[in-house]
Amino acid sequence: MAKGAATAGVIPTTERMTRYRWVVMGLIFIVYTLAAADRANIGIVLPFVKKEFAMTNTEAGAVVSLFFVGYSVMQIPAGLLVKRLGTRIVFPIFMILTSLFTGVLGTTGSALAMKLNRLALGFAEAPLPVTMLSTMNRWFPAQEKGTAVGLFLAAAKFGPVIVPPLGALIIATLGWEYVFFICALPGLVFAVLWYVLVVDEPARSRFVSPAEAAHIGSGFAATPTGPTPSTAPSSAGTTRFVRLDRVIRGRPVRPIATAKETFASGNIWGLAIGYLMMTGIINVIFAWLPTYLTTVKHFSLMNVGFVASAPFVGGVLGNIMGGLFSDRIVGKRRKPTILISTVSTVFMMVALIHAPNEPVTLAILLFLTGFLLNVGYSSFTVYPAGLTTKDAYPLAVSVVNTGGQAGGALFPFLTGLLLDTYSWDAVFLFLGASALLAMAVMLLVVEPVERDGPRKTL
């Protein structure tokens, strides 16, 4: 049987089905962990860079934010680039550039050079999540996408889990510059591995059996004439979750198929605004938390490394559990986990105003904050898959990512301004208000579902 035919028919039952898509997912997890580490290492070195270059909090916020300026500006061009050239070409090029600019950060000798290099790193890293999300959209059927994206975004938190304790050890023994040098090396190796092991279409991979190709391909629609199978599961339609769908505005939708429809979609822009708020909150935590622990709590360097990793350990678990809950409990509905995250984040920001000074207790509070903040975070980037066709997804997720990274650029800078003018209490109140606004916006976004299955009144 030809692989091309497999994607259009029934999954063969007489042939062993490979599971190579999970090998690809493992590679995605590793490389996004590396990319996230390249992005997050600024947090652990920021107190030392700030002191060495005599920066104000606002200037330090600019160092953090300029990465996300480049990252945000490059999102939509990255989506167009991936659509034109494919992930197999785009990913290795920009993974190598990401590693090179990470290494260059260790050679900077002024605040201006640090800012410019961070901006360049943002441009270089921006296409990476687009390529990986596009790869997952093509390599996983509908019923596995939430789990896959949950693992993907868990990797984004796993990098910051590793960086604080490892970075603290490197700084204590070698100096802050070597944090960047060491983080730069692995990406060069994995850029080559990606080119060798991952192709754009699963059916063309020599490691994928026709049965697996058919299993993957069964989740996509060939035309945009109605809701695609990726919109909702065949047995989890609006008649099964009547009350829930009233709250989350669950309804069948016609998939977005063109760039014009993408840019005109209120649902896509609503997702972008919600993602802006939540990404901004997360980026403030990973960029400013070590500084907070150093200057407010007066922790030792090793305690800073330990406590600063806690919200990202929680984030890893939150992303995974949120993806599983979304896929298996609420019929691939994405908004419930998002609403859980937004509401709980409001309360956690208030709790942080009264944060304890004892490292273990504070680490537990931050772990819980990271977990709740990230339960719904993966849903933002898998959400567009239910609103679009396969071909329209890269651009749609680029628009959503642009919103997210705009928040990532704005919030750390605003944090610096607030700290120069007010205090950390004002920062936590600002973050809580942002989560509340994200909840309000997301209540207006439509949840794409199909109308089938037995009635259930959850």
Image (cartoon, rainbow, N blue to C red):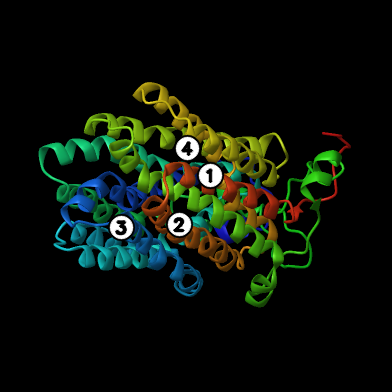
Q: Nearer the viewer, mark 1 or mark 4?
A: 1
Relative to 387, is 242 above or below?
A: above
User: Could you tell whether 105 is left or right of 242 in the image?
Assistant: left
Tell me which numbered mark, 1 or 4, is placed earlier along the sequence: 4
Q: Residue at x 56, y 68 (%)?
A: 395
Q: Amino acid at mark 4?
A: Gly
Q: In the image, which disc is placed on residue 315?
A: 4
Work out whether mark 1 precedes mark 2 in sequence or the reverse, and give the earlier one: 2
Q: Say whether residue 230 is visible.
A: no
3 on left or right of 61: right
Q: As displayed, is residue 436 above or below residue 226?
A: above
Tell me the amino acid under the disc marked 2. Gly
Residue beneath disc 1:
429
Quarter of image, res 12 = top right
Q: Amino acid at mark 1?
A: Leu
Q: Which mark is residue 408?
A: 2
In the picture as drawn, the residue positioned furthest to the left comes out as: 174
Find numbered disc 3 in the image and state the secondary structure of the residue it sits on: helix
Q: Which of marks 2 and 4 precedes in the sequence?
A: 4
Quadrant into which the N terminus falls: bottom right
- Tell me the amino acid under the disc marked 3: Ala
